[in-house]
């Protein structure tokens, strides 16, 4: 279900939760930038992966290819730096 980003070389995956306002901010930014991404619900089936990727239980976590980004503010800044026109 993972879809490539517009440039076709990097896959984006967002690990988020149903009631996480920080996750909603990141989702809105991904949609604003028109980026394709896979969303994994960390509350249901992705918590172990979140811990493995980041060493913490906090979400959101965003992966771009093999790179792991944490903290919604940092994630949004990185998305804008990479993909904003």
Image (cartoon, helix red, strand yellow):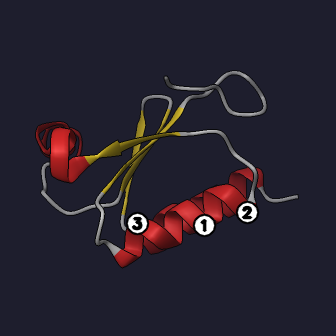
Structural distance between the alpha carbons of marks 2 and 3: 14 Å
Is residue 28 shown above or below 36?
below
Tell me the tag on residue 66.
Answer: none
Quarter of image, res 17: bottom left
**Residue nearer the viewer, 63 or 38:** 38
Mark 3 residue element:
helix
**Residue nearer the viewer, 13 or 82:** 13
Q: Residue at x 40, y 66 (%)?
A: 23
- On the image, the x and y values in percent for residue 1 come to 49, 23
Structural distance between the alpha carbons of marks 1 and 3: 9 Å
Left/right of residue 53 with respect to residue 23 in the rendered view: left
What residue is shown with label 2?
A: 32
Sequence order check: which comes first, mark 1 or mark 3? 3
**Residue nearer the viewer, 73 or 23:** 23
Q: Quadrant of the C terminus?
A: bottom right
Q: Residue at x 49, y 62 (%)?
A: 75
Q: Residue furthest right?
A: 85
Contact, CB < 8 Å: mark 1 with mark 2?
Answer: yes
Left/right of residue 80 with respect to residue 21 in the rendered view: right
Q: Residue at x 13, y 49 (%)?
A: 55
Q: Residue at x 77, y 33 (%)?
A: 6
Q: Residues within 10 Å of mark 3 (few under 14, many from 20)?
A: many
Mark 1 residue element:
helix
Structural distance between the alpha carbons of marks 1 and 2: 6 Å
Quarter of image, res 16: bottom left
Quarter of image, res 4: top right
Sequence order check: which comes first, mark 2 or mark 3? 3
What residue is shown with label 1?
A: 28
Mark 2 residue element:
helix
What residue is shown with label 3?
A: 23
- On the image, the x and y values in percent for residue 40 come to 34, 41
Q: Residues within 10 Å of mark 1 (few under 14, many from 20)?
A: few
């Amino acid at each position: 279900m993972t879809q490539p980003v517009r440039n076709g070389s990097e896959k984006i995956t967002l690990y988020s939760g149903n009631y996480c306002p920080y996750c909603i901010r990141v989702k809105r930014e991904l949609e604003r930038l028109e980026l394709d991404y896979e969303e994994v619900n960390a509350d249901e089936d992705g918590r172990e992966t979140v811990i493995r990727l980041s060493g913490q239980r906090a979400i959101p976590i965003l992966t771009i290819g093999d790179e792991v980004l944490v903290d919604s503010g940092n994630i949004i800044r990185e998305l804008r730096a990479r993909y904003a026109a």
